Amino acid sequence: MRWKALAAVLLFAATARAHFVFILPDADGRAAKVVFSDRLEPDERVTMDKLANLKLTLRRPGQPEAPVNWANSQHCFELPIRGEGPRLVYGAAEYGVMQRGEGKPFLLIYHPKAIVGDPPAVHPLRESVPVEIVPVRGDGGWRLRVLARGKPRADAEVTILTSGESESKKVKTDADGFTPAISASGRCGAWTSLTEPKSGDHLGKKHGEIRHYATLVVTLPAARN
């Protein structure tokens, strides 16, 4: 029995995938769910307990930013999205200090972002966040751009999840921070990371660096002819 239990643990460790914080707007753009998952849907195997410090903000063109309150559901957070037209919800959650093997202890911070409506109508967050992903319309379809403190980040790895595809796709940004074009339309999710060599103390635990994970969820309109 002991060997069977060990085999089950090893199998789970081998097949487990990294989880990220995604904001998933509803189809009508009036509400959203925050999930901790490897897909653009809630993962019923995990809880949201360690993300209870998540702070969210609503940005609407021409209006002051406003905090967004969320309610804890079983495997997600639920929140309203006030207003009409293009909007952006973004935030940050300090997951805690972690260590992998003999590496440095690091503080893990998630930076989720979702766009409701026409993506170009919502301006990037730029210097206000460590790292973000921005959708940009161009020749051949949409591309994603990675900005670190508002500046293009070259050679950044971006993982992209698009509707209708069961597997994610990893790409690299070019010298101007752009990914290759995304020909698919519909809901798209993406994540990327940035490590800062900053030591400090978080809730009594010391860390030698900070790892930021930025996510984006957006609905990409079909390419224009």
Image: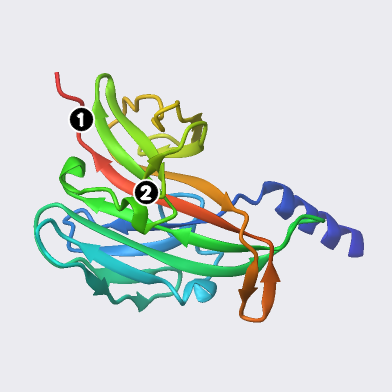
Residue drawn at x 65%, y 51% is 16
Please, which residue is most extreme toward the bottom here?
204
- The amino acid on which the numbered mark 1 sits, given as a three-letter code, is Ala
**Could you tell me if the residues under marks 2 and 1 are in contact, i.e. CB atoms within 8 Å?**
no
Figure quadrant of residue 139: top left
> Earlier along the polypeptide chain: callout 2 or callout 1?
2
Residue drawn at x 39%, y 75% is 73
Where is residue 189? Give x, y as percent.
Answer: 38, 44
| Residue 1 seen by the camera | no
Front residue of 2/146: it is 146
Residue drawn at x 41%, y 68% is 76
Mark 2 to mark 1 CA distance (whole Å): 18 Å
Figure quadrant of residue 187: top left
In the image, residue 114 sits, relative to residue 75, either above or below, namely above
Q: Is residue 10 left or right of residue 140?
A: right
Front residue of 28/223: it is 223
Q: What residue sits right under mark 2 in the picture?
A: 216
In the image, residue 192 sits, relative to residue 154, either above or below, namely below
Q: Callout 1: few (<14), some (14-19), or many (20+) C-alpha neighbours within 10 Å?
A: few
The N terminus sits in image quarter: bottom right
Q: What residue sits right under mark 1 in the picture?
A: 222
| Residue 129 seen by the camera | yes
Q: Is residue 118 left or right of residue 157?
A: left
Front residue of 142/194: it is 194
Front residue of 91/150: it is 150
Secondary element at tag 2: strand
- The amino acid on which the numbered mark 2 sits, given as a three-letter code, is Leu
